[in-house]
Amino acid sequence: MDPEHAKLLSKFSLDSSFVFEGLEDQLLERLATVASAKSLRPGEMLFHAGDASNGFYGVLDGLLKVGVTAEDGHARLIAILGPGDIVGEMGVVDGLPRSADVVALRASELAFVRQDDFEAIAEANPRIYRHILQAISIRLRRANEAGSARSLLPLEGRLARALVGLADRFGNALPDGRTLIRYKITQSDIGNMCGAARENVNRQFAQWRQNGLLSKISGYYCLHDKAEFDRLADFSGL
């Protein structure tokens, strides 16, 4: 195996990816052998909605933003992906064009597996589809939960849910018990996640800052009481 594929195999094997968790070493090696490395600069587009699907990408390092543009021209943030996630996997299953725009938020390193190469591996090892379907299932579940939250939660709860999701994914626990979200996100992006205008996001954040629940450190949001945000974000009893 050449050095590039050996590096990709190391990433596939060592990263805490729910997609490839439990996949046999032999199949990981085959995926790494057919994968090619791709680098993105901050702000560089990976693909647009409507582009032909020709394979999927595994995120090895960096951050990607997944979004769509509504008929009225407004952009909506669907997801933020980091190491261990895959993107473009739906096309592997249904062969349809890309369903969203994906752009790098930070310098990112990806592993690209072409559709033909994946299908050749999956033909001999069909159980690999279970891992791809698991990724799709988790993403759909998150989308369904987001839809339910939009319907059931007031703005405060929807914004709390967005911050909790970011904290669960990118949060660092500080010694004093606060949670620092190690990802810089704008109020407009948070509003897009929740179906809220930036002005309303700003108003709620100001209220949380006044109540001592939220602050900003070097451009990063910090939750002073994550349990309270968890409570605000919970709609199971509604």
Image: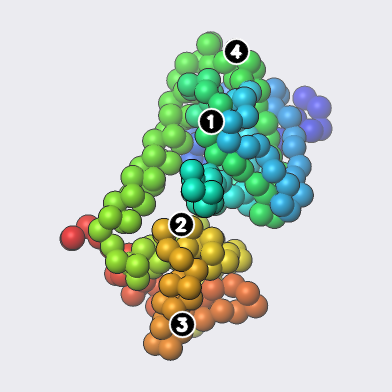
Task: Choose mark 4 or mark 3, whichever is in front.
Answer: 3
Q: Nearer the viewer, residue 196 or 112?
A: 196
The Cα atoms of the two marked residues, 4 and 3, are separated by 54 Å
N-term mark: 1 or 3: 1
| Above-or-below relation of 133 to 63 | above
Please, what is the three-letter code of the amino acid marked with disc 4?
Answer: Ala
Q: Image quarter for residue 207?
A: bottom left
Q: Which residue is mark 4?
A: 120
Q: CA distance from mark 2 to mark 1?
A: 22 Å
Query: What residue would you read off at disc 1?
Result: 89
The tag earlier along the polypeptide, 2 or 1, is: 1
* Amino acid bearing label 1: Glu
Picture quadrant of residue 6: top right
Q: Is residue 61 visible?
A: no
Mark 2, secondary structure of its residue: helix
Give the colour scheme shown.
rainbow
Which tag is nearer the camera, tag 1 or tag 4?
A: 1
Q: Are marks 2 and 3 in contact (CB under 8 Å)?
A: no
For label 4, count other residues whose C-alpha is less than 10 Å away and answer few (under 14), some (14-19) or many (20+): few
Q: Is label 2 in contact with label 4 (beta carbons under 8 Å)? A: no
Q: Position of residue 100 (x, y in %)?
A: 55, 39
Q: Position of residue 186 (x, y in %)?
A: 57, 66
The disc labelled 2 sits on which kind of residue?
Met
Q: Quadrant of the N terminus?
A: top right
- Nearer the N terminus, badge 1 or badge 4? 1
201 vs 234, left or right, is right
**Residue at horizontal 51 percent and vertical 81 percent from the top:** 215
Report the disc number at residue 206: 3
Residue on which the image places disc 2: 193
- Nearer to us of marks 2 and 4 is 2
